[in-house]
Image (spheres, coloured by chain):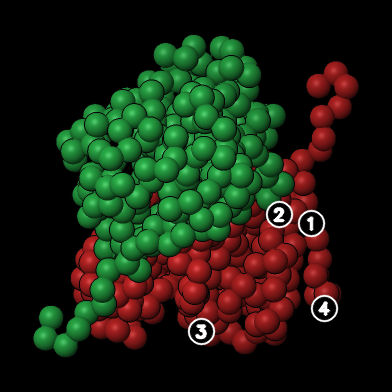
Chain colours: A green, B red
């Protein structure tokens, strides 16, 4: 399993990444789907052991909350080995603009993290606005976002994904779909993102793991985010078909 | 005041539409801005008397709720003379598909109206979905909308406006901005709308008023919705500059 080009599999299994010193792995559609571990995923994670790093565009959890949730599904992955777009975006903001006033279109978990990083959540007169996978997104948040942008706030978008595959195979709305609403109201939108296909999350995982790109494998289900990020970072890519494509179709008599 | 081309004014005043048998008038930006009557608007409405018809892409109120609200601002306009995109979309659906199961991304007022029209609000397995200016729009509604569309529901969008001008001059998100989120999740979107620039609301007002297009004036602040609808319907158009353009700029010493 050391081919140069991308390999495609329909499911993960133990031993699949034994040749690599670090295994960077997307979460939704690879290890889990909604609240369920995907077939083979727990065995795969166990065989990777401490070589496994989660690199996900998730922008509603924190590493700590996600580690706890993954434990209930049989995955033993400490927060230190979980890199998430939403959390990383907040950490980047806190590094670049210590103590900044921040408008959060984001979950309560990210708001608590922002406070713990010394940022000051506000609803007006913000220095920076973070758009993440916000469960309370709607007309009020949209209107407030327009006003903080009009006031000169810098916009950070955790991740650009429009959707991720739901447990039923249908698209589940993601942060990028919320961004489409904002862009409709405020057309001259410019923003930064740390989410894939940017390579920031992958670089941070490799830095923490102490490995070079040639020693790492990236495992993902989305060629447009995971695949491009892996290619940009010079990391071998293992393409896992998302459950809806990997599942056998219905047959007569089913 | 019977020029063939569009006339532009910075504010309404009494007598401005005396030459017309029916005066169709947009609401936001013409008569009111947010919760305030615009300068000259009450005098204008009084001078029109029963010749005045509200024709608005509003999709959160009903004619009854709006008539009550306008009364507190000094306007005496009964519900029968108020045509709103959201309410009219529901009435059209009830006419075309009596008793239909309807998914409502809409205000509680529109839900109550849907029930009174014999429609059955559901969250799954809908025959038709209505997207209006939904105060509770967000990830849950988006996800449910994708699922009812995947199940074959017909989509009706009350109005296509991306924004309307807020009281502070900044864009306030409208139903079209919410539609942009849905289109991001479900790209092959097709839908019907009754809102301007469609002419359905104007035709219904003229039918109720018993006038021909040549006898009517349309008063609106948005050339792209009001102006185009008036042109399509063959009605003279009076362009009222929205408050932010009509207001004098700040001067030194202000």
Q: In this view of the protein, which residue sits in the foreground, B219 or B56?
A: B56
Examine the rendered structure and indicate whether residue B236 appears above or below residue B174. below
CA–CA distance in space, label 2 to label 4? 19 Å
> Do circles 2 and 1 both sit on a common chain?
yes
> Do circles 2 and 4 both sit on a common chain?
yes
Chain hosting mark 4: B
For label 4, the residue is B4
Q: Secondary structure at mark 1?
A: strand
Q: Secondary structure at mark 4?
A: loop
Residue under the point 58% across and 77% down:
B198
Residue under the point 37% across and 43% down:
A18
* Label 2: few (<14), some (14–19) or many (≥20) C-alpha neighbours in 10 Å: many
Examine the rendered structure and indicate whether residue A224 appears above or below residue A153. below
> Do circles 2 and 3 both sit on a common chain?
yes
Q: Is residue A107 left or right of residue B157?
A: left
CA–CA distance in space, label 2 to label 1? 7 Å
For label 2, the residue is B12
For label 3, the residue is B207
x and y, in percent, of residue A116 in the image: 42, 14
For label 1, the residue is B9
Task: Confirm or deny contact between disc 2 and disc 1 (CB under 8 A).
Answer: yes
Q: Secondary structure at mark 3?
A: helix
Residue under the point 52% across and 29% down:
A211
Task: Confirm or deny contact between disc 3 and disc 1 (CB under 8 A).
Answer: no
Chain hosting mark 1: B
Q: Secondary structure at mark 2?
A: loop
x and y, in percent, of residue A125 in the image: 60, 23
CA–CA distance in space, label 4 to label 1? 15 Å
Considering every residue shown, the one lying at the far right of the view is B252
């Amino acid at each position: 399993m050391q081919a140069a080009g991308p390999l495609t599999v329909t499911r993960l299994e133990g031993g699949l990444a034994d040749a690599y010193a670090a295994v960077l792995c997307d979460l939704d559609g690879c290890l889990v789907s909604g609240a369920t571990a995907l077939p083979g995923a727990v065995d795969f994670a166990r065989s990777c052991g401490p070589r496994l790093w989660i690199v996900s565009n998730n922008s509603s959890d924190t590493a700590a909350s996600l580690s706890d949730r993954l434990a209930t599904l049989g995955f033993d992955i400490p927060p230190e080995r979980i890199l998430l777009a939403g959390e990383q975006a907040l950490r980047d903001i806190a590094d670049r603009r210590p103590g900044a006033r921040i408008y959060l279109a984001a979950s309560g978990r990210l708001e608590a993290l922002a406070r713990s990083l010394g940022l000051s959540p506000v609803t007006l007169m913000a220095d920076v606005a973070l758009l993440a996978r916000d469960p309370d997104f709607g007309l009020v948040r949209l209107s407030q976002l327009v006003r903080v942008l009009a006031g000169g706030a810098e916009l950070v978008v955790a991740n650009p994904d429009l959707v991720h595959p739901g447990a039923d195979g249908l698209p589940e709305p993601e942060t990028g779909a919320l961004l489409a609403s904002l862009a409709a109201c405020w057309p001259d939108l410019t923003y930064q993102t740390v989410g894939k296909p940017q390579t920031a999350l992958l670089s941070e995982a490799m830095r923490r793991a102490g490995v070079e790109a040639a020693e790492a494998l990236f495992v993902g289900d989305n060629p447009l985010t995971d695949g491009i990020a892996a290619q940009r970072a010079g990391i071998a890519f293992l393409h896992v078909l998302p459950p809806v494509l990997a599942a056998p179709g219905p047959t007569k008599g089913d």
